[in-house]
Image (cartoon, rainbow, N blue to C red):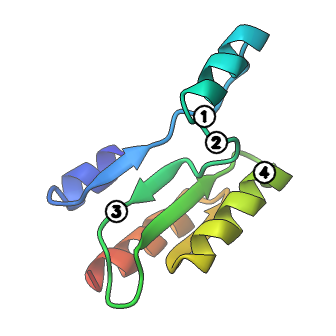
Amino acid sequence: MNYIKAQYPQCFVVHIPNEGKRTRFEQYKFKILGAVAGMPDVMIFDPKSNLSGLAIEIKAGYNKPTENQKKCLRELENRNWEVFWSNSLDEILDRIDNYMKNV
């Protein structure tokens, strides 16, 4: 987030705080409030020609997206979002830069 805000201060970007373990009550509360399991970690809401935005799922180590995360990425892709997941910071920064060059 710091990189995006420093390089692209005009960018409308949010981090979706879906990670972490929650109690049953917290899970219930999040669901009632409209939270969706599997939302990508970072969403850039700056449209680009035929795309609505950029959604990024960030993974550490050898982790891969969960089924809920894959479903969310597909749903966003079906709605003209550029989506991807990665465990490489360099790849993430390259993809952000390439996307933002064309905004």
Q: Quadrant of residue 94?
A: bottom left
User: What is the distance, in whole Å, between disc 3 and disc 4 at their CAs?
Assistant: 21 Å
Give the structural element (helix, strand or loop) at label 1: loop
Furthest toward the front, the residue is: 32
Q: Residue 102 at what x, y percent from top left?
A: 29, 86
Residue visible at 65% across and 68% down in the picture:
75
Q: Quadrant of residue 8?
A: bottom left
Closer to the camera, 26 or 61?
Answer: 26
User: What is the distance, in whole Å, between disc 4 and disc 2 at their CAs?
Assistant: 9 Å
What's the amino acid at mark 3? Phe
Q: Which residue is mark 4?
A: 68
Q: Residue 6 at what x, y percent from top left?
A: 21, 52
User: What is the distance, in whole Å, between disc 3 and disc 2 at their CAs?
Assistant: 18 Å
Answer whether labels 3 and 1 touch (C-beta < 8 Å): no
- Which of the numbered marks, if any, corresponds to residue 18? 1
**Residue mark closest to the camera, 4 vs 2:** 2
Q: Which residue is mark 2?
A: 36
User: What is the distance, in whole Å, between disc 3 and disc 1 at their CAs?
Assistant: 18 Å
What's the amino acid at mark 1? Asn
Nearest to N terminus: mark 4 or mark 1 = 1
Quadrant in which the C terminus appears: bottom left
- Which of the numbered marks, if any, corresponds to residue 45? 3
Residue visible at 64% across and 42% down in the picture:
36
Answer whether labels 1 and 2 touch (C-beta < 8 Å): yes
Sort mark 1 into few (<14), some (14-19) or many (20+) by Cα contacts within 10 Å.
some
What's the amino acid at mark 4? Asn
What's the amino acid at mark 2? Val
Residue 40 position (above or below residue 48): above
